[in-house]
Structure formats: structure tokens, C-alpha cells
Amino acid sequence: YLFWTEWGQTPCIGRAHLDGSEKVVLVSLGIAWPNGISIDYEENKLYWCDARTDKIERIDLESGGNREIVLSGSNVDMFSVAVFGAYIYWSDR
């Protein structure tokens, strides 16, 4: 799969096969500026950070369900996120 984030009029997080087929929007509500994404294959989770909502969230990798807020800050411009084992690393601008 290829995963991506989009800003703009209709921000979203999507997934498609590498040939571009079977596009699926996994998240389209409650996001504004989704930035970095990271995949935790051991837990089958997709993580992303949002520079507008100041949150790191995650969903189930396959279904897009079970959305959870992992970290919520204030006045932080979250830019990228990485997951390694039990640790989450993030940066701001």
C-alpha cells in the first residue's frame, strides 16, 4: 500500500495499492493539516500528526477504525512522527 495525507479544502488520509488502484479515504473528519504519517506494522496501526489540531492520532491500519488520540498539545506545530517499538518520536517546525 501507499499511504498519504492531504491538506486543503478536504483534508484526508488515504490509502491505495502501489499502482494507484482501490483508493480508500481512511480519515476525513476532525483533521485540518495532517502532516507526517508512520506505520507500526507490529500493532497494525497508522499514526499521524496534525499541525492545526496539535495532536498525534492513530487508527487501525487495514480498516481505519478505532481512532485514538495518542498525544494532544497546545501551541505546538507538529510536523513529523515516527514509531519504533514502544516509542513515538515527533518533531515540530
Image (cartoon, rainbow, N blue to C red):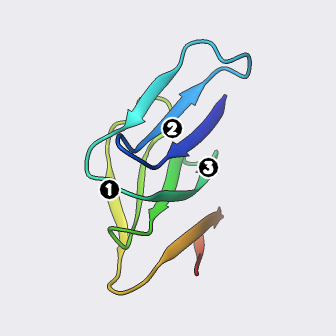
- Considering every residue shown, the one lying at the far front of the view is 9
Q: Residue at label 2? A: 61
* Residue 85 appearing in the image: no
CA neighbours of label 1 inside 10 A, class few (<14), some (14 to 19), many (20+): few
Q: Quadrant of the N terminus?
A: top right
- Considering every residue shown, the one lying at the far top of the view is 21
Kindly state the secondary structure of the residue where label 3 is placed: strand
The picture places residue 65, in percent across and down from the top left corner, at 34, 37
Height in image: 46 above or below 81?
above
* Three-letter residue code for mark 2: Leu
Q: Residue at x 35, y 40 (%)?
A: 10
The picture places residue 61, in percent across and down from the top left corner, at 51, 38
Q: Distance between the residues labelled 2 and 1?
A: 12 Å
Observer-nearest of 45 and 37: 37
Check residue 68 in the rendering and tell me which mark sits there, or answer none: 1
* Residue 2 appearing in the image: yes
Check residue 39 in the rendering and tell me which mark sits there, or answer none: 3
